[in-house]
Image (cartoon, rainbow, N blue to C red):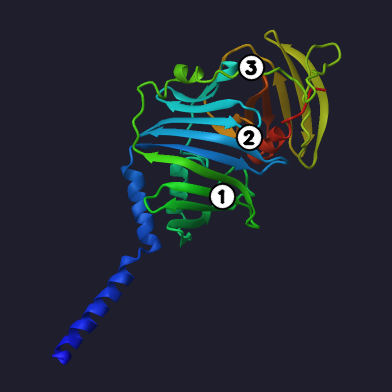
């Protein structure tokens, strides 16, 4: 009797062991399931905190993302340092960067976010996992932890990223690191839901322009609230603290264009470019092409104007800045970031 039972016991043990081996998903299985979840979802809502260490001072944003397939996006970025909300909006009219407290909007035709999608978008994280054949995966406290390549054209120092997903593929945390594996950008998701419902006007430009009740802040004010002046004019000048290697600052020209006081800072050398500062009265600006760029303290618009020339525009404290020239994108961002927190001279 005992001899007859022994083969059955061994068969049962072998079956359990075999089931345990095949029950554990391989990285390829997980990626396949992730790809399936990405394809099946109709949209999502997320809430997160974005921390950027790429400048001299850490910057934090509250980030709210709404996405409705196939192309509706609403990204609200609120700077914790400045208390200012900007919205990146995509609908069937185009892509907009809205600054509600200034009643200001940039509109442009763009492939955003398909081209150079930011870290806080779920599909950016998911696709970076799916597309990296050299990805690494491990389980950590019932979460999938992936280590994959980072590919962000605006900052070549960001080379690696780690992404944490729950077993049902909701993101909880992500980090982008430099070559020494030092985290420079991180995002912590506090809320995430698949397939939500949206109001009919959730992605309407006019509705989103009225979402902020924040007051306008003083124009061209320094840390002490004083506004500096140019001689023989009524315009303060922000001089960037960063200048690319091999470049020297030239003349500063105060001019008037279409009744708007403007100053132009000229730079020549290894790169040739101009920094234009103005206080325009127009509420809306349109571009034929371009994409949003997160500068850390605000959202800018980057457009290619020639084979080697590009234009970066952003708004800060009521002043519109434009860099135009042959600077690479990464250097443009460095120059722009170095204008933050400066008073006029």
Label 2: how many residues lie within 10 Å, few (<14), some (14-19) or many (20+)?
many
Q: Is residue 169 above or below residue 241?
A: below
Q: Is residue 304 visible?
A: no
Which residue in the rendered view is the most extreme toward the right?
A: 231
Position above or below: 107 against 261: below
The one of 194 and 136 positioned closer to us in this rendering: 194
In the image, residue 89 lies at what x, y percent? 47, 27
For the question of whether residue 217 can be seen, the reply is: yes
Task: First in sequence, mark 3 or 2: give its number.
Answer: 3
- Residue 182 in the image: x percent, y percent? 64, 54
Gap between marks 1 and 2, in whole Å?
17 Å
CA neighbours of label 3 inside 10 A, class few (<14), some (14 to 19), many (20+): few
- Residue at screen point 63% across, 35% down: 295
Percent across and percent down for residue 50 are 57, 40
In-front residue for pair 148/261? 148
Q: Kindly identify which numbered label has been placed on residue 295.
A: 2
Q: Position of residue 304 (x, y in %)?
A: 58, 32
Secondary structure state at the residue bearing disc 2? loop
Residue for badge 3: 216
**Pointer 1 and pointer 2: residues touching (CB < 8 Å)?**
no
Disc 1 or disc 2, which is closer to the eye?
1
Judging by the rendered image, the residue that carries numbered circle 1 is 175
Judge from the rendering whether residue 249 lies leftward or rightward of residue 93; answer left or right.
right
- At x 51%, y 55%, the residue is 148
Q: Earlier in the sequence, mark 1 or mark 3?
A: 1
- Bin the neighbour count of mark 1 within 10 Å (Cα to Cα): few under 14, some 14-19, many 20 and up: many
Q: Image quadrant of residue 142?
A: bottom left
Q: Quadrant of residue 277?
A: top right
């Amino acid at each position: 009797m005992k001899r007859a039972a022994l083969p059955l016991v061994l068969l049962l043990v072998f079956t359990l062991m075999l089931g345990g081996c095949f029950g554990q998903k391989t990285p390829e299985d997980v990626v396949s399931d992730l790809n399936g979840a990405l394809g099946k979802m109709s949209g999502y809502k997320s809430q997160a905190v974005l921390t950027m260490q790429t400048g001299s001072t850490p910057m934090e944003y509250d980030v709210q993302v709404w996405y409705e397939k196939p192309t509706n996006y609403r990204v609200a970025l609120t700077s914790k340092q400045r208390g200012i909300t900007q919205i990146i909006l995509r609908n069937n009219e185009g892509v907009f960067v809205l600054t509600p407290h200034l009643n200001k909007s940039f509109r442009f035709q763009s492939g955003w976010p398909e081209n150079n999608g930011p870290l806080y978008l779920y599909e950016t994280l998911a696709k970076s996992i799916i597309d990296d054949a050299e990805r690494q995966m491990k389980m950590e406290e019932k979460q999938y932890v992936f280590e994959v390549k980072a590919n962000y054209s605006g900052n070549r120092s960001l080379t690696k990223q780690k992404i944490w997903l729950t077993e049902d593929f909701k993101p909880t945390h992500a980090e982008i690191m430099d070559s020494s594996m030092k985290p420079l950008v991180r995002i912590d998701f506090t809320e995430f839901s698949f397939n939500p419902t949206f109001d009919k006007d959730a992605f309407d430009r006019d509705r989103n322009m009225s979402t902020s009740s924040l007051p306008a802040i003083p124009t061209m004010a320094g840390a002490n609230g004083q506004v500096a002046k140019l001689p023989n004019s009524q315009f303060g000048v922000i001089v960037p603290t960063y200048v690319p290697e091999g470049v020297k600052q030239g003349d500063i020209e105060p001019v008037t264009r279409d009744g708007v006081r403007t100053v132009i800072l000229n730079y020549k050398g290894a790169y040739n470019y101009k920094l234009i500062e103005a206080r325009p009265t127009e509420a809306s600006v349109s571009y034929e092409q371009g994409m949003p760029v997160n500068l850390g303290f605000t959202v800018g618009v980057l457009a290619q104007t020639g084979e080697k020339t590009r234009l970066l525009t952003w708004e800060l404290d009521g002043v519109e800045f434009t860099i135009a020239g042959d600077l690479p994108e990464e250097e443009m961002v460095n120059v722009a970031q170095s204008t933050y927190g400066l008073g006029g001279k």
